Image: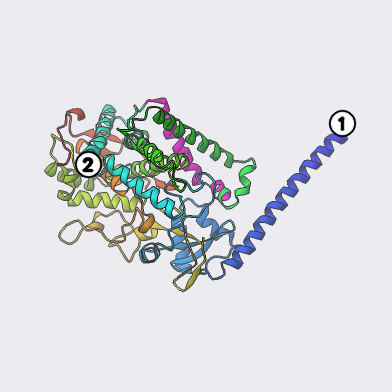
């Protein structure tokens, strides 16, 4: 027994040793190939400079780590994710040149083949399929409320629920994270599923929690390792939790699709899923159609990730900044009183009449910096850029933070200052370096939806409440936590009611 046991341990050690050897061999081989095939890329930290390359991948604030490296190597340089070279772009001018002036050359996405396998809209490769998906997505968004009075009312319906939840705290300190996420998620649910959910619905809670877990995993080092070394996907390890969470999300979305298919009315599509299923039926005989159930699943996933997390996080920053800068909060409230009053909720037509509030909202988006990086771009063909040769599939890491904090583009880039969006007469102006939704062909298609939500939620909440620091609360921490998005650290607030009228009784507000 002892010899058998010893042999078993030694065999296992041999297997481990060979496994490590194989991994090291694969990485070193890939490294040498990468160095040879990308010899004409911009200069940057050496492939073997682990400390500098980890600045990009594993620090709490990789966007600022890249900006620090840019001071040494310039606004375009090469860094590495494990063994994969990435060209980092910094500063508004550099980003504009790549994504606008040469936008079609850099409109690709790297295909790491982990979750979506290039399906959906965000990570799809550039080409005919992506163009059809995006065009169809924009059509559905228009048909189901974007720019129409009906969509404003969907947002304001959630505004009313959120106001009543905040009011029910009766001045007691609370953390607003879950309530804000639920409200914004329900707006997306109304577009995608054709219904809203009660905030205590267990299925709704499970869905929002899974999306939150997915984002946290994608910001971690194990996700980076799995992307760079996809063969590790079959091995046990912490990264397997990511795959289990993603499988649960896919199962939930597929269950919604199944229920929609069973109750589908060919004459009256209720929502995004219905419209997509109908279009799939029309094109089912077409061999080149990209409208597949796999694409539908990941279009729904992308809508939730892009439509919920970014807007909810921006609103959390908005409240935190109003608590931190009470003079700005008070000035916003005065302008809201003058334009909207007390008897109705705001509408989108009010926006042009509120230059100061518009400046504050844009400064929240700039300084909050919710999306520090675009999803990675890739060259779709060999391209000459700034005297460098970007071979096909070269990955581009676009640092939006570097544009939003570009000292050459902003009056006061390193402080929260609405004056960044005002001229000398106090009128609202938007500098061209304001690109929180990116630029070019792969810019976020949901920008208008996000801006409508942000405006209506923000104005309605400031109309109803003053946001206060609870007694004995620690000082504000504005550093944020990076997890794909840059979110505020958890905080508590207290609200002081300014309008006691029940939200459901507030008069019509929808734009005419």
Q: Classify mark 2: residues with Cα within 10 Å, few (<14), some (14-19) or many (20+).
A: some
Q: Is residue 18 left or right of residue 172?
A: right
In this rendering, the label closer to the viewer, 1 or 2? 2
Q: Is residue 151 magenta?
A: no
Q: Position of residue 325 (x, y in %)?
A: 26, 47
Q: Is residue 82 left or right of residue 327?
A: right
Q: Position of residue 41 (x, y in %)?
A: 52, 68
Residue at the image position 66 percent from the left and 59 percent from the top: 28
Residue pointed to by mark 1:
1
Is residue 400 visible in the rendered image? The answer is yes
Magenta stretch mostly in which secondary structure?
helix
Q: What label does residue 148 carry, if any? A: 2
Q: Nearer the viewer, residue 291 or 252?
A: 291
Q: Position of residue 507 (x, y in %)?
A: 14, 32
Residue at the image position 43 percent from the left and 63 percent from the top: 105
Q: Quadrant of residue 373?
A: bottom left
Element on which disc 1 rests: loop
Q: Quadrant of residue 16?
A: top right
Q: Classify mark 1: residues with Cα within 10 Å, few (<14), some (14-19) or many (20+).
A: few
Residue 313 vs 379, above or below: the answer is above
- Alpha carbon distance from label 1 to label 2: 77 Å
Instruction: Tell which residue pokes out farthest to the front in this image.
Output: 285
Position of the N terminus, as image quadrant, is: top right
Q: Which residues are magenta?
A: 200-225
Position of the C terminus, as image quadrant, is: top left
């Amino acid at each position: 027994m002892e010899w058998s046991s010893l042999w078993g341990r030694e065999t296992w050690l041999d297997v481990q040793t060979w496994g490590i050897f194989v991994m090291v061999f694969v990485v070193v081989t890939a490294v040498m190939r990468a160095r040879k095939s990308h010899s004409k890329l911009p200069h940057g930290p050496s492939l073997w400079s682990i400390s500098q390359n980890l600045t990009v991948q594993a620090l709490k604030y990789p966007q600022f780590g890249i900006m620090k490296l840019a001071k040494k190597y310039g606004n375009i340089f090469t860094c590495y994710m494990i063994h994969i070279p990435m060209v980092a772009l910094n500063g508004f001018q550099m980003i504009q040149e790549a994504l606008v002036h040469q936008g079609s050359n850099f409109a690709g996405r790297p295909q790491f083949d982990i979750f979506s396998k290039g399906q959906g809209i965000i990570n799809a490769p550039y080409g005919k399929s992506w163009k059809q998906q995006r065009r169809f997505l924009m059509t559905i968004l228009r048909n189901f409320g974007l720019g129409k009075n009906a969509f404003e009312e969907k947002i304001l319906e959630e505004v009313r629920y959120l106001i009543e939840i905040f009011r029910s705290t009766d001045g007691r300190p609370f953390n607003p994270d879950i309530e804000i996420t639920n409200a914004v998620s329900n707006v997306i649910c109304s577009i995608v599923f054709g219904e809203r959910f009660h905030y205590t619905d267990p299925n709704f809670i499970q869905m929002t929690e899974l999306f939150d877990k997915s984002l946290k995993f994608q910001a971690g080092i194990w996700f980076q390792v799995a992307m760079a070394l996809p063969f590790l996907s079959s091995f046990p390890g912490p990264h397997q939790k990511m795959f289990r969470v993603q499988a649960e999300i896919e199962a939930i979305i597929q269950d919604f699709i199944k229920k929609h298919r069973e109750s589908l009315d060919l004459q009256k599509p209720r929502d995004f899923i219905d419209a997509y299923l109908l279009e799939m039926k029309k094109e089912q005989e077409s061999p080149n159609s990209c409208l597949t159930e796999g694409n539908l699943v990941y279009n729904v996933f992308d809508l939730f990730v892009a439509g919920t997390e970014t807007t909810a996080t921006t609103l959390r920053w908005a409240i935190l900044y109003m608590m931190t800068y009470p003079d700005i909060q008070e000035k916003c409230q005065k302008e809201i009183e003058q334009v909207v009053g007390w008897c109705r909720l705001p509408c989108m037509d009010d926006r042009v009449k509120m230059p100061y509030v518009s400046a504050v909202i844009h400064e929240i988006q700039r300084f909050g910096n919710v999306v520090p990086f675009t999803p990675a771009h890739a060259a779709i063909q060999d391209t000459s850029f700034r005297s460098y040769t970007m071979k096909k599939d070269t990955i581009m890491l676009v640092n939006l933070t570097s544009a939003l904090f570009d000292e050459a583009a902003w009056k006061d880039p390193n402080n929260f200052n609405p004056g960044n969006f005002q001229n000398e007469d106090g009128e609202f102006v938007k500098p061209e370096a304001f690109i929180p939704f990116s630029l070019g062909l792969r810019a976020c298609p949901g920008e208008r939806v996000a801006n409508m939500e942000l405006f209506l939620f923000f104005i309605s909440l400031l109309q109803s409440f003053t946001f206060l620091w609870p007694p004995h609360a620690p000082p504000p921490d504005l550093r944020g936590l990076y997890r794909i998005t840059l979110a505020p650290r958890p905080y508590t607030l207290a609200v002081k009611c300014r309008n006691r009228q029940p939200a459901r009784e507030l008069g019509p507000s929808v734009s005419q």
